[in-house]
Amino acid sequence: MKKILTLALLGLAGYPTQAQTTTPTPELQIKSAILAAPADKRAGATVYGYTPKGMAVLRKGTNELICIADNPTEPGFSASCYHKDLHPFMTRGQELRKEGKKSQEIFDAREQETKAGKLAMPKQPSTLFVLSAPEENYNPTTGEVKNGYLRYVVYIPYATAESTGLPLKPEGPAMPWIMHPGTHGAHIMINPPKPDAK
């Protein structure tokens, strides 16, 4: 489950220069990135993607969602979209990862910074959408994704099982549960069955 929590961080990680020739066009990156967003939010979402100089805004949006394009240097396909109030949290994770920090170190640093008032977390529940697919289901020349798997994370800083009524682990397919309760990174996990599940 740690992979789900850090997917957006990984999407914001540094971009190696050797992959410049395989980077999809900004238009194709935008097309595939917004597939992670709800349909009614796609047209107005801000999109970050990859350029020869690193991560950049490919499209400035008009609504509350920020989408991160698939990293062409990573295997498979993974795009994410999140509420704009999560942006400080996400970008701080990027900075810490560039410093060489590991997942637990990043978590601990952001916990301390949030408690110290240095890192702003959303005051309301804020959602992260993550769309993934295996390599063979993503066409980088068209931006199309087949049979993508969409997961949901709703951040509620410092929420607990008691304050939400949620369990600490899922007991069935798509059952919501709370992860990292009582911390800055407390969030509701919702993992639907995968498309090929019987």
Image (cartoon, rainbow, N blue to C red):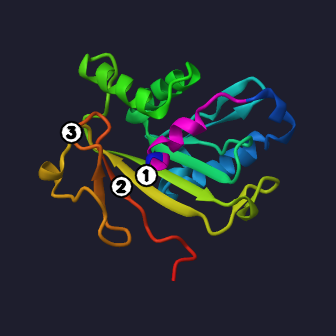
Q: Which residue is drawn at 42% across and 55% down?
A: 152
Q: Are marks 3 and 2 in contact (CB under 8 Å)?
A: no
Dot 1 or dot 3, earlier in sequence: 1
Tell me how many marks there are: 3
Identify the residue shown where x is 66% and y is 53%: 77
Task: Kindly identify the amino acid type of the residue bearing the numbered disc 2.
Answer: Met
Does residue 76 appear to the left or right of 20 in the view shown?
left
Q: Name the residue under label 3.
A: 182
Name above or below for residue 185 compared with residue 142. Answer: above
Q: Name the residue under label 2.
A: 189
Callout 2 environment at 10 Å: few (<14), some (14 to 19), or many (20+)? many
What's the magenta region?
3-15
For the residue labelled by badge 2, is the local secondary structure a helix, a strand or a loop?
strand
Provide the major secondary structure of the magenta segment.
helix
Q: Which of marks 2 and 1 is nearer the N terminus?
A: 1
Residue flagged by tag 1: what amino acid is it? Met
